[in-house]
Structures are given as C-alpha cells and as structure tokens.
Amino acid sequence: MNSFPTMPVVEALGWTLIHFIWQGAVVALVVAIAKRALKRRPANLRYLIACLGMLAMLALPLVTFLALRYYSPPPDVATLEPHQLLEPSRPESLRVDLADYLVSGGDLIGSNASSPASDRRGRFSQLAPWLTSLWLAGVVLLSLRMLGGWLYARRLKTHLIGPLSEEWQFRFAQLCRNIRVLRPVRILQSALVHVPTVIGWMRPVVLIPASALVGLTPSQLEAVVAHELAHIRRYDYLVNLLQTAVEIILFYHPATWWLSREIRQEREHCCDDVAVEVCGDALVYARALTEIEVLRNISPQLAMAADGGSLLSRIQRILGNSPEGSDRTASWLAGAIVFVSVFVPAAGAQFFSHHGESVEAAVTSSESTAQQVSVHSTRLIGETGETAREMKDSDKQREKSRLSEMVDPSAGVDSEEAPSVRTPSVQTPSVETPSVETPVVETPRSQAAGGSFVEEMTALGYTNLSVDALIRHKNSGVSTQLVRELKAYGYDRVAVNDLARLASVGISGQYIKDLKAAGLERLPLESLARLATHGVGPALIKELGDLGYKNLSADQLAQAASHGVSPQFIRSLQSAGFKDLPLAEAVRARDHGVDGVFIKEIRERGYSNLELKDLIRMRDHGVDSVFINTMESGFGHLPVEQLIRARDHGVDPGFGKKMRDAGFPNVNLDQLIQLRDHGVSASFIDSIRKSGYENATIEQLVTMRNHGVDAEFIRRAKSQGFQNLSIDQLIRLRDADVFN
C-alpha cells in the first residue's frame, strides 16, 4: 500500500484560515439573500436559515483543513485534460496534488520545483507559524472572556436572590403550562440583574429584578416573563453557548460576527412572537419593552436577557411597522463583507506570486511599522506596486462615495447636548461582539429646502448625528415636518431621542394645536407623551368638561385615562347618584370596581344612603347583591358592618340553619361568628350532647372547644371513674393533663 504524504499541520491550518475568508463571505451572502427573500415569512424560518449558515461556517474550515492535510502525491499534469484528472484508473504518478490545487486558487499546475504554487507554498510556510500563533492568541483571549461570562452567569444564580410572592409563583406556573415548558424552572428575584434574564440549560432559572416588579405592570411583566420562557422552551441558552464557541474559533472574520448578530436578532423575534401570542396584546408587550430600556444594563454574554437584539426594530416589528431599512443594511453589509473578503485574498495571492521577495523582507523586518513596510514594498515592486496603490486609493474613494449616497453629509442635535426634558428612549442595544464604532458625520449647516432627510434636519439645526442615529430615528417616524411644527409651537432644539418618542406616540402639530384649544398650553414634552400614550385628545377633554370636570391638568387627564375613567364611567356614577364626585374619587371607585351597575344593585337591596367609601369596602370584601339576598333569607336586613363581618368570617344562612337545627333556634349573627371562628360545628355540638351534656350553652361549647374537651376526652374521663363531672371540672382536668 502506498503511503500518502501530508501537509504540515501549521501550514494546513494557516491555509484553512486564509480560505475561510472567502468561504465565510460566500456563506454570509447566501444567508443575506435568503433572509431578504424570506423577510415576509415567520421569524422561525429565518432563524433556521441563519443557524444553518453558522453550521456551514463551522464545517467549511474543517473540510478544508482535512483536504489540505491529507493529499495525494503531486503529478506532472501539464499535458492532461481536466476530465482525465478525475479518472480513478490513473496511475499514482498522474494524480492531482490537491493541496497545490487549493493553494493555487484552482489552477491545475505541475509538481516541478519551480511551479508558482510550490513557490507560494514555500513562502507561505514561513508566514504560517505567525498567522497560526496570532489566531491561537485570539482564540485563547476570547475563551477567557467566555469563561468570565460563564462564571458571572453562575454567580447571578446564587448571589442576592430571593423567592417571589405566592401570587407570582402561581402566575409563573400558569405561564409555563401555557407555553408548554415541561422542564422544572425556577423564578427568583435578583438584586444583580437589571432586566428579566434566563440563565441555565439543564436547570434554568428566570431572574426578575426588583425594579421590574415595581416599574412594570403585572400584564407587562407577564409578557416579558413569557419571552424568557420561550427561550427556555427553544433551548436557546444551549444554542447560544454553541454560537459563542463558533465566534471564538472564527473570530477574525467579520461575517462570523454579522451572522451571529442576525441569529440573536431572529432569536429575539421568535420569542417576541411567543410572548405576544401568550399575552394577547402586542401594544402591552411593546410598552413593556420600552420600559425595559429604562432598566437596561449590560448583561453577561451567556445569559439570555429580555433586552437582547435591537429593541427599536423589535418594537416596530411587533406593532407591524418593521422598517425595511434594516434588511437593506444587512444585505449591503453582507455584500461589503463578500467584496472585501474576496478582494483581499485575491490581492494577497497576486502579491505572493509576483512579489515574494518583498513579503520576505517585510516579515524579517517585523519590528518596523505598517507604514514603513508599505513604503518599502512599494519601492521594491516598482510600477506594478504603484498601480496597486492607485487601485487601493480608488477603492477608498468609491467607498466614500457609497457612504455619501447612503447618508448625505448632514447631522442633527445630539440628544445629550439638547436642553430638553429627558424621556426614556428605545435605543439599539450593544451586541456583545467586537464591532467598529460608527463614525460621526459632521457637515456644515445646509439651508437648502426640499433636500434629503439629512439635509433638512441639518437645516433645522441638528448636527453631529451618527449614521446609526440617523437611520434609527428616520425609521422610528421622526420627520422634518414634526420638527418644524414643534418649533412653531415653541419647542426649540428638542433632543433627537425625545423626537423619536414623540413620533412613536403620534404627536403632531395638529395634536398640540387641539390641546391648546382645549386649554392645555406649553406642556412639557413628558406630559405631551403621556397624554398621547393614553389617548387623551380634545374630544375626551370636552366630554369630561361637559360632565363637570373642567380645567383639568395634564396629569389629572393622564391619570384618569390610564385608570380607565372614561366619560361613560362618569355617566354611570352620576346616574347612580354621585354627581359631584371629585376626579380622584372617581379614579378610586374605578380601581376598586365600583361602577353605576354595582351601586344600583346595592341600592335595590335597601342600602340607599351609602357613601362611596362604604361601597368600596363592600366591594373589597365581596359583599354584593347576591350575598345580601342570601343573608336576608336567613337573617333579614342587616347593617353593612354586619354583612362585611359575616362575609369575612364565612357565615352564611346555611351555617345559621345548621346551628338552629342543632338546638339553638334563637342564635344571632354575633354568636354564629363566634361559633364559626372557634370551629364549633354542628357535628361537635351533637357529639357533646350525646356524651351527656345536652344543656351546654354556646359560650360553654366555645370554651370546651378552645380547651380541647371533646367527646373522646369525656369518654376517657368516665372510664377512669369520673362520672357526672361538670363542664368546668372537665376543662380543669383537660388543662391539668391528668390522663397522660
């Protein structure tokens, strides 16, 4: 059997790293095209495509390494046709050198010592140890970073945690059933996390920050917890671990980080869909994500947090207004990665084949700066090098032109510089991967009218906005018309983040004008946003005014709307007799479920002169018309206080009938409450009477029950010779514990 020579491991690994530059770029382009074609399809399908792309990125280097490592002996194939090279019957001397084929970029070459591929391999073998060492150093550093994140995630599960209330434990168990999470999952309160977070795969834990319990409504928090449970059901924590491992191995390629970001984004979209399906209200979940932005902080990489991905794009997608700009940006970025990844290796291959001596000189002078190496190489390669440099300058110029076409030189007021009211804004969270900081576009103020969005924003005084900020706020609905209208009503130099929030809730010049006509002038931006969020408009203000609630402040209007105090609710209270009720009392009645229907039902049972506080107490204690009707059948008309006491102690006509049948025909409500509180039941009374104490009073029965004197104790006393004892004697015997 013939032995097959192998390429050295270091050299094969170096060529594998080089080949993955174009391989990874092709995979990224294919995924970008597929995502573009499937942008209207479910997020689960796009997530699957992205994960398959990541697996392909992992498989391609392995296949390339094995192909380079184990190759056949080099033949002289200069005179062979391409189809003859694949014939298995060819003698060993006529087989193609696979390593030379891959190294040469696909040219079929001979195996003589002077072949270009052999020269190229010889030169690269000198660079391979350096390239491999740099790659290994990066892998080690990122592995340490991953280990640190894993240790911190483990610490979150055990430090400064505590159980949630029983109510939330019940809600959490119900959510697990609704989402079909079959594994045991714990939910804990944590002082270390800033947003709801899930950690772990085999024994997952959902951590809820204390600020979320206070800052989110129960429905909002349920929606966010449903999002975290969706991560658990989909085994996203495990997938994230494997994804992080791929990032570490292929860290040097931009396509790896781009595809990883796309996977995380689509993963969040999938879980968002589950959360919206469970909570049933996309608006509630979108508002919950907005509130999370206020609580957001950087989470450990190995933890699945509710603020993952771009919150702005997620909210727009949930509300059915997903911007297409992100798809275009992703496609453009993938194309740029392909261009750079294919152009650089091609240029490097030409550099190796024609100017090997300059490369060797550059390697041996590794202590020189990059600029000195470039000058020295240009001096050696002569005219061809000058041409390459001109091509490089031309590429830079084209790239600048492309950037100028995307974002015209302009800007806007930076949100940190504008002197305006601060409101929480949805910003794109930072992806936990190395990224290039977006440059700030600074241009002179443009006074041109009718220009692009950027030009008009610049003309309105907004400068020094980054490219990301421009795209983000454009997609969020910020328009130059809104800026002009705000200026017209006295809102000068509004921060861009505030503009985004005002646009997201539908603020316009007409809305401000209508509020002004209704008596609300020069409101703070926060008040404007609150009014618009809760749907307070001129029609509502007018209706409330017609009902007697005139000259309400913006805070009062927002409070009424947020608590569901509508004109219809006010009319129901007024029709029930509460005509001059203060707005705060109306809000209180709404919060406790006291409306016109409840008040009329109570009055029909004979309680016509009750104050609102009495009605609220009855509602809180469960005293309604049905309970009153039941009590009247056995006790007649009772005062409100007795009704509440009876309800609280579990006394109803059925219990009263049992006591009357047990020999107390004239028992009153207070005695019934006493009997119920001390556990004196009809069966207990019957057993005492059968033991010889037929004439025991209610007070005596209560005392006997409190001291543990029952029928069994009486039987034991009689068996010891204690006959005809009084109830007081029985109680003293029981207290003395003489039978033990």
Image (cartoon, rainbow, N blue to C red):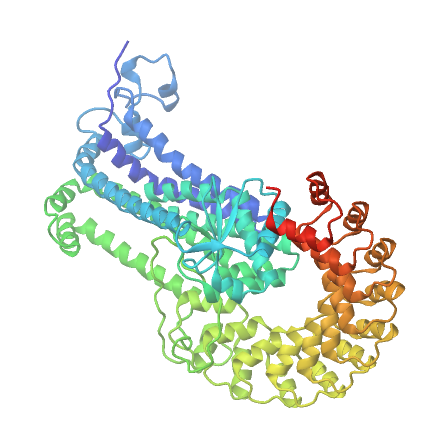
The image quarter in which residue 64 lies: top left
Name the one closer to the observer, 388 or 338: 338
- Looking at the image, residue 253 sits to the left or right of residue 283; the answer is left
Name the quadrant of the N terminus: top left
In percent of width and height, residue 395 lies at 32, 56
Name the one closer to the observer, 526 or 484: 526
Name the quadrant of the C terminus: top right
In percent of width and height, residue 161 lies at 44, 54
Q: Residue at x 75, y 70 (%)?
A: 618
Q: Residue at x 40, y 52 (%)?
A: 156
- Looking at the image, residue 2 sits to the left or right of residue 310; the answer is left
In percent of width and height, residue 169 lies at 57, 52
Name the one closer to the observer, 502 or 179: 179
- Looking at the image, residue 433 sits to the left or right of residue 509; the answer is left
Look at the picture and state if 408 lies above or below 27: below
Look at the picture and state if 90 lies above or below 190: above
Look at the picture and state if 421 lies above or below 721: below
> Does the rendering let one see residue 322?
no
Count of numbered circles on the image: 0
- Looking at the image, residue 380 sits to the left or right of residue 192; the answer is left
> Does the rendering let one see residue 543?
yes
Look at the picture and state if 4 lies above or below 431: above
In percent of width and height, residue 661 lies at 87, 54
